[in-house]
C-alpha cells in the first residue's frame, strides 16, 4: 500500500528534477547553446511555431549560434522573434544565415545569474519537499483508515525522507555544475 504512494511521490520528484535540468539548460552562461533559442516562437506562415521548425540551429564556436532558415523569406520574422524574446542578443544576417554572437558575461552579470540560479534551485527543492509532504499526508490518512500500521507509516516516512534527500542532492549537484559554467 505504501509502496504505491512512495513510487508516485518519487515519479513526481523525477519530473521535478527533469524540469530543473531543462530550466538550467535554458539559462545563458556565456557559452553558446541551441537551448537558448530553440523554444523561441516565430510568427510566420500564418501560424506560430518554434524557431527550430523554421531553421537549422548550429553552434560553430563557444560564442556563436547560427540559424539557417529553410526559407530565407522568414529571416525578418525570426529576427523579430529573437528581439521579442528579450534574451539580450542581437541577430545579424547575411541574407542566408542569421548569426547570434553572445557577448562575454560581466562579473556583475555572473553574480546576478548565480543569485537567479540559486532562487530557481530553491524553488525546485521546495517542490521536491512538497511532493514528500503530500505523500506523507496520504500515508497518514491511510494509517487513520487502519489500512496500515503505525510501524509501516514510520518506515514509509523514513524511506520517503531518504528519497527526498537523494533528489535534493541531485538538485545541488546540477546547481554546482551550472555555477562552475557561469563562473568559467
Image (spheres, grey):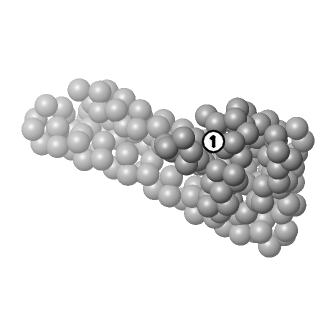
Q: Quadrant of residue 90?
A: bottom right
Of residues 162 and 18, which is closer to you in this image?
Answer: 18
Taking the spot 48% from the left edge, 35% from the top edge, the residue there is 14
Taking the spot 44% from the left edge, 51% from the top edge, the residue there is 127
Percent across and percent down for residue 55 are 69, 36
Q: Is residue 121 left or right of residue 173?
A: left
Percent across and percent down for residue 165 are 51, 44
**Quadrant in which the C terminus is drawn:** bottom right
Kindly state the secondary structure of the residue where label 1 is placed: helix
38 over 70 or under it: above or below: below
Tag 1 residue: 51
Taking the spot 73% from the left edge, 63% from the top edge, the residue there is 88
Percent across and percent down for residue 91 are 78, 55
**Is there any visible trace of residue 3 in the rendered image?**
yes
Which residue appears farthest toward the left when viewing the image?
Answer: 145
Percent across and percent down for residue 22 are 59, 43
**Quadrant in which the N terminus is drawn:** top left
Which residue appears farthest toward the right when viewing the image?
Answer: 61
Q: Is residue 21 left or right of residue 184?
A: left
Q: Is residue 130 left or right of residue 35?
A: left
Amino acid at each position: 500500500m505504501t509502496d504505491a504512494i512512495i513510487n508516485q511521490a518519487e515519479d513526481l520528484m523525477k519530473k521535478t528534477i527533469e524540469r530543473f535540468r531543462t530550466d538550467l539548460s535554458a539559462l545563458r552562461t556565456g557559452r553558446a547553446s541551441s537551448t537558448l533559442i530553440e523554444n523561441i516562437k516565430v510568427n510566420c506562415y500564418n501560424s506560430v511555431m518554434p524557431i527550430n521548425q523554421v531553421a537549422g540551429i548550429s553552434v560553430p564556436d563557444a560564442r556563436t549560434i547560427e540559424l539557417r532558415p529553410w526559407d530565407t523569406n522568414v529571416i525578418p520574422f525570426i529576427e523579430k522573434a529573437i528581439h521579442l524574446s528579450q534574451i539580450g542578443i542581437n541577430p545579424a544576417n547575411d541574407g542566408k544565415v542569421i548569426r547570434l554572437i553572445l557577448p562575454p558575461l560581466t562579473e556583475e552579470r555572473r553574480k546576478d545569474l548565480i543569485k537567479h540560479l540559486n532562487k530557481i534551485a530553491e524553488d525546485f527543492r521546495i517542490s521536491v519537499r512538497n511532493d514528500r509532504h503530500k505523500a506523507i499526508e496520504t500515508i497518514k490518512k491511510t494509517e487513520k483508515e487502519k489500512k496500515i500500521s503505525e510501524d509501516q507509516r514510520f518506515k514509509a516516512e523514513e524511506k520517503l525522507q531518504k528519497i527526498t534527500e537523494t533528489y535534493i542532492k541531485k538538485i545541488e549537484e546540477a546547481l554546482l555544475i551550472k555555477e562552475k559554467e557561469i563562473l568559467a
